[in-house]
Image (spheres, rainbow, N blue to C red):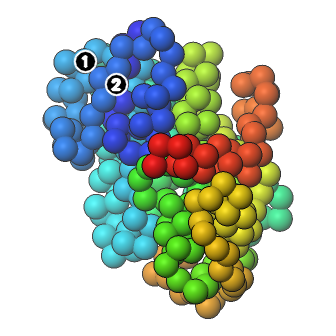
């Protein structure tokens, strides 16, 4: 099976390569070798590789910066996805595209089902919704949230650094979602793709947390295995106390029940996967 991964050097791209099935012949590109905003270069790449499966792990993810350069974010998160979908259809590939909980406004009191009405409240969310629509009904579209991995820029690594440097950390406590371990998401994408699943689906780890809950768990687990030398106070704050250019959904827990049924099992609880990730950092740096 020939596979083209776009965004191969990101957290998810690396996870996809690390968890690939034995029969996957992978070609991986990132921004240094392929500008997906260049439709001509994108088509030429797909024409050259002739993949059976095209995995789009590339995205413009600077949520706050997108407020001032929505056109740039749209070129990557929206327009490029349409070009990927067109190339996939032309050359007989199946497209797998990853989206986000930010397509929702966060006003729900219950987890968002895949069929729930999107209503993004940020430029980033709007561009990701545009990408979903550009991917088309024949693509596999998986919404996820709060992705982290042992490498790259993410909340876990930031918290570890701040907890080692500062006398205290202040973390938003009124935004609720679910952390997602990138290798677990990658395995789910491989399985769903192998089963021929199409349409919009949701996948995160199990459970729910605030960013504050997540930060407290990071410190507790890191102290337990010696990644941190001493505890520091973790202070819960409100979103209003930490203003940002982009609005975030206050509640963006995704309903994964149909996805877990398709996979044959639920994802591990987010804290279990956090423990796995921290142990990997402790072992491999």
Residue found 55% across the figure and 37% down from its top = 183
- Against 33, is 208 above or below? below
Is there CB contact under 8 Å for labels 1 and 2?
A: yes
User: For the point 73% across and 77% down, which residue is it?
Assistant: 174
Question: x and y percent of residue 76 in the render?
Answer: 32, 51
Q: Secondary structure at mark 1?
A: helix
> Marks 1 and 2, how far apart in space?
7 Å
- Tell me, yes or no, if residue 52 can be seen here: no
Q: Quadrant of residue 215?
A: bottom right
Can residue 14 be spotted in the picture? yes
Which quadrant of the structure image shows residue 160? bottom right
Mark 1 and mark 2 lie on one chain; the one further toward the N terminus is: 2
Which residue is label 1 attached to? 49
Residue at the extreme right of the image, as rendered: 110
Q: Which mark is residue 4?
A: 2
- Name the residue rendered at 60%, 69% in the picture: 229
Percent position of residue 195, x then y: 62, 16
Number of other residues with Cα within 10 Å of mark 1, as a class: few under 14, some 14 to 19, many 20 or more: some
Q: Secondary structure at mark 2?
A: strand
Residue 181 in percent (x, y) is at: 60, 45
């Amino acid at each position: 099976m020939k596979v083209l991964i776009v965004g191969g050097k990101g957290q998810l791209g690396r996870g996809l390569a690390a968890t690939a099935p034995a029969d996957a012949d992978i070609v991986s590109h990132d921004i240094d070798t392929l500008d997906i905003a260049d439709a001509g270069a994108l088509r030429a790449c797909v024409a050259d590789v002739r993949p059976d499966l095209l995995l789009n792990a590339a995205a413009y993810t600077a949520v706050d910066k997108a407020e001032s350069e929505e056109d740039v974010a749209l070129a990557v998160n929206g327009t490029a996805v349409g070009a990927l979908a067109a190339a996939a259809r032309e050359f007989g590939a199946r497209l797998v595209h990853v989206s986000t909980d930010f397509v929702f406004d966060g006003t729900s009191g219950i987890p968002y089902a895949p069929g729930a009405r999107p209503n993004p409240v940020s430029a980033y969310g709007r561009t990701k919704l545009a990408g979903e629509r550009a991917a088309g009904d024949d693509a596999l579209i998986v919404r996820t949230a709060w992705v982290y991995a042992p490498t790259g820029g993410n909340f876990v690594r930031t918290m570890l650094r701040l907890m080692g440097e500062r006398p205290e950390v202040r973390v938003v406590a009124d935004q609720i979602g679910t952390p997602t371990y990138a290798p677990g998401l990658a395995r789910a994408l491989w399985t769903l793709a192998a089963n021929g699943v199409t349409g919009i689906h949701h996948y995160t780890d199990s459970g729910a947390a605030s960013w504050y809950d997540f930060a407290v768990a990071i410190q507790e687990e890191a102290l337990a295995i010696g990644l941190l030398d001493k505890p520091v106070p973790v202070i819960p704050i409100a979103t209003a106390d930490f203003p940002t250019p982009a609005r975030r959904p206050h509640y963006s827990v995704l309903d994964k029940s149909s996805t877990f049924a398709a996979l044959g099992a639920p994802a591990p609880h987010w804290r279990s996967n956090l423990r796995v990730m921290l142990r990997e950092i402790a072992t491999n740096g």
